[in-house]
Amino acid sequence: MTTEVTRIEIADQLEGLFANGAVSKHDMLIAAVGARPEVLEVLSGLPDRRYTELRQVWEDLPRIPVGA
């Protein structure tokens, strides 16, 4: 059984990524290369735009729960 992807799990994968400025969906996928396939699938569903902070990711993923 696969556990649901959470914001905490995504944040753990993207930790520190926003320190140097805006990032793209592609940048996030590269940063999360070691994540579970389910996390990569969620990140792949993001729109192609620039994100300057993690909070903006949550705006595009409103249904992802905070934690389990």
Image: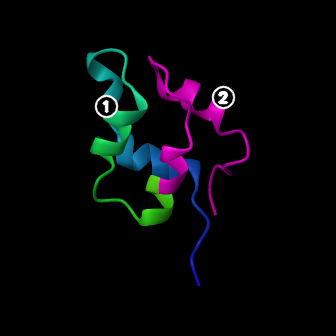
Q: Quadrant of the N terminus?
A: bottom right
Q: Secondary structure at mark 2?
A: helix
Compare marks 1 and 2 and give the one earlier in the sequence: 1
Q: Find the residue positioned furthest to the right.
A: 63
* 63 inside magenta stretch: yes
Quarter of the image for residue 35 reads: bottom left
Kind of residue indicated by mark 1: Leu
Residue 28 horizontal/vertical position (percent): 37, 38
Kind of residue indicated by mark 2: Glu
Which residue is pictured at 58% across the width and 73% down the height? 3
Q: Which residue is mark 1?
A: 17
Residue 51 horizontal/vertical position (percent): 46, 21
Q: Magenta stretch?
A: 41-68
Q: Secondary structure at mark 1?
A: helix
Left or right of 15 in this view: 8: right
Q: How many residues crowd mark 1 within 10 Å: few (<14), some (14–19), many (20+)?
A: some
Which residue is pictured at 49% across the width and 45% down the height? 43
Up-down: is 54 above or below 39?
above
Which residue is pictured at 32% across the width and 33% down the height? 27
Quarter of the image for residue 23 reads: top left
Q: How far apart are the alpha carbons under marks 1 and 2?
A: 17 Å
> What secondary structure is the magenta-colored segment mainly?
loop
Q: Which residue is mark 2?
A: 59
Up-down: is 10 above or below 59?
below
Q: Which mark is residue 41?
A: none
* 62 inside magenta stretch: yes
Q: Find the residue positioned furthest to the bottom.
A: 1
Q: Nearer the viewer, residue 6 or 32?
A: 32
